[in-house]
Image (cartoon, rainbow, N blue to C red):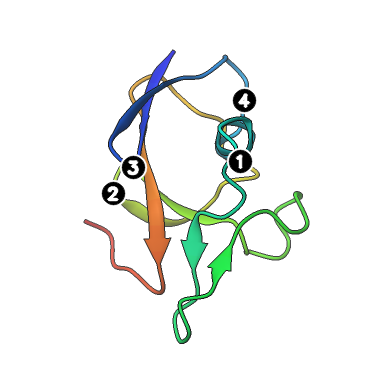
Amino acid sequence: MNIRVDGAQVVAEPGQTVAGVLLGLGRTSWRTTRGSRRPRGVFCGIGVCFDCLVVVNGIPDVRACLRVVADGDEIRVQHGAELPS
């Protein structure tokens, strides 16, 4: 299936999570904190810590470790607190 990550076309396997795709691309961080803009990525991997937040299809605060990719998904880095587009 085809998805876009920060504007780049990426091929993902069915059943992969967003975090799995990003880690497979060699990305270890894909969110920045609100105050200090420090990088964050997967910490717990089970949806408890909320460190792996990304924007998927214009919806912010999606936990990358839990969200299974779907064909056509648009995924991008989340910078701090964002409103849905």
**Which one is closest to the eye, mark 3 or mark 4?**
3
Lower position in the chain sequence, tag 3 or tag 2: 3
SS for tag 3?
Answer: loop
**Which one is closest to the eye, mark 3 or mark 2?**
3
Q: Nearer the viewer, residue 28 or 60?
A: 28
Numbered tag placed on residue 72 in the rendering: none
For the N terminus, give its image quadrant. top left
**Which one is closest to the eye, mark 3 or mark 1?**
3
SS for tag 4?
Answer: loop
Lower position in the chain sequence, tag 4 or tag 2: 4
Residue drawn at (57%, 15%) of the image: 13
Q: Residues within 10 Å of mark 2 (few under 14, many from 20)?
A: some
Provide residue 74's location: percent of width, then percent of height: 33, 36
Q: Residues within 10 Å of mark 3 (few under 14, many from 20)?
A: few
Marks 3 and 1 in Cβ contact (< 8 Å): no
Residue position marked by numbered label 3 in the rendering: 6
Disc 1/disc 4 C-alpha distance (Å)? 8 Å
Residue position marked by numbered label 1 in the rendering: 19
Name the amino acid, label 3: Asp
Numbered tag placed on residue 58 in the rendering: 2
Disc 3/disc 4 C-alpha distance (Å)? 18 Å
Residue position marked by numbered label 4 in the rendering: 16
Name the amino acid, label 2: Gly
Provide residue 20's location: percent of width, then percent of height: 64, 34
SS for tag 2?
Answer: loop
